[in-house]
Amino acid sequence: MRRPATVALALAALVAGATGCATAPARGYEAFVAANPRSILIVPVANRSVDVEAPDYLLSTLPVPVAERGYYVFPVNAVKRVLEDDGLADPFLVHGADPVRLAGLFGADAVLYVTIDRWDAQYMVISTTVTVELDYVLKDGRTGDVLWRSHRVVQQTPSDGTGGGSGGSVLSALVGAAVSAAVTRASPNYMGLARQANAAVLAFPGPGFPAGPFRPEYRRDVAPGPGAKPER
Amino acid sequence: MDRRGTRRGLAALFLALAAGLAGCAGSTSTWRWGNYDDALHAHYRRPQDRATYVAALKEIILAAPREGKTVPPGIYAEYGYALLEEGNGAEAVGWFERERDTWPESRVFMEKMIVNARRTVPASQTPPAGPASALEKGRS
């Protein structure tokens, strides 16, 4: 008589287990989990692209997704200005500096370095491909060791949007595509692509950071390795 | 009886499913950011239009407690830094203290910023009343 309910309950437990937050294998996260950072210093973005404004634009997209992983993120604009005042206006100088000294200046547990490898739009006759290619490295503020790294290329080629229906002539399709290319040329959606890249590299489980101390699943989403250190 | 049991079981299943999904939702925002990233982006695009940026920071600070949310990390400090850039070191000190007291992780940096900001304030000038009583903590 009670059987259906029991079976359903067992099923419920099973489903709950399956849909609950997956615990990621510790593999690849040993150093991160052992370092157990609470705070992340996002330093100014280094730029290998030809777009001189790209690094500042990208910097503005970083604090929200990083902090939302559960970490204290230092105020990126104040950090950037203070470094400039201290003679470190060139982000490559900052990226090349000793991470332990840099982290010590701010009292940061870890430092996030982001480099733009590409940030451009290739204009073709009928369409435009916008490319954003970013490199992310997180270093331990106490040892300077790399805790995590990721690389992402995001591309967008707007479709011509004419649908190619039987009613549309080749000419109207071309005109539509030309308009689409012109719109993209006016303002390539770099920021949208940059946000996509950030979201993809920070997603967890996946390549992203395990949950930090300000998230409820902190220390429950990765099996702690034997080298895990107590909270500091 | 059988049917009721099954129904109860099904309800439990849906509840468990919902709980599982909710528990893993990555989209739930821990903090109330307002339009912080857009405002910072606009600030880098048009540095001369700094009033909009400063207003956006202030909006986050005012709106978060009203909505029962927490002001995100770094925002008090960014606001304090903006005031310092405008020559208002006295008020900046209060916001740096607030960042430090809210987020102990920021202590080392904020202590430095407090020293810097105090240096800009002439000794004769008494700091104006802070925007919140908590800001007066530690100031003597």
Image (cartoon, coloured by chain):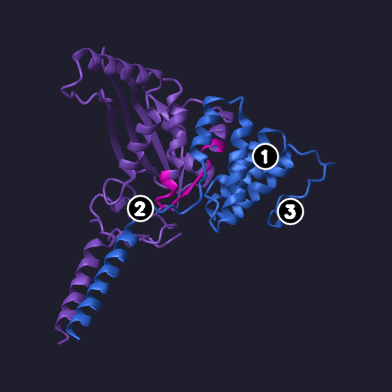
Chain colours: A purple, B blue
| Few, some or many residues within 10 Å of mark 2 (<14, 14–19, 20+) | some
Name the quadrant containing residue A148. top left
- Which residue does the image show at 21% across and 82% down from the upper left? B5
Q: Residue lying farthest front?
A: A167
Instruction: List x then y, in percent, for residue B79.
Output: 62, 42
Q: Mark 1 vs mark 3: tell me if same chain.
A: yes
Sequence-first disc among 1 and 3: 1
Q: Chain of mark 2?
A: B
Under circle 1, the secondary element is: helix
Under circle 2, the secondary element is: loop
Left or right, residue A101 beside residue A192:
right
Q: For the N terminus of chain B, which image quadrant? A: bottom left
Nearer the viewer's eye, disc 2 or disc 3?
2
* Above or below, A94 relative to A178: below
Left or right, residue B84 beside residue A39:
right
**Can you identify the residue that label 1 sits on?**
B116
Disc 3 marks a residue whose amino acid type is Arg
| Few, some or many residues within 10 Å of mark 3 (<14, 14–19, 20+) | few
Sequence-first disc among 2 and 1: 2
Residue sitting nearer the eye, B98 or A186:
A186
Disc 2 marks a residue whose amino acid type is Gly
Residue sitting nearer the eye, B135 or A65:
A65
Which mark, residue B26?
2
Residue sitting nearer the eye, A53 or B137:
A53
Under circle 3, the secondary element is: loop
Left or right, residue A209 beside residue A16:
right
- Which residue does the image show at 25% across and 56% down from the upper left? A24
Which mark, residue B104?
none
Q: Chain of mark 1?
A: B
Residue extent of the magenta highlight? A65-78
Disc 1 marks a residue whose amino acid type is Asn
Instruction: List x then y, in percent, for residue A226.
Output: 28, 61
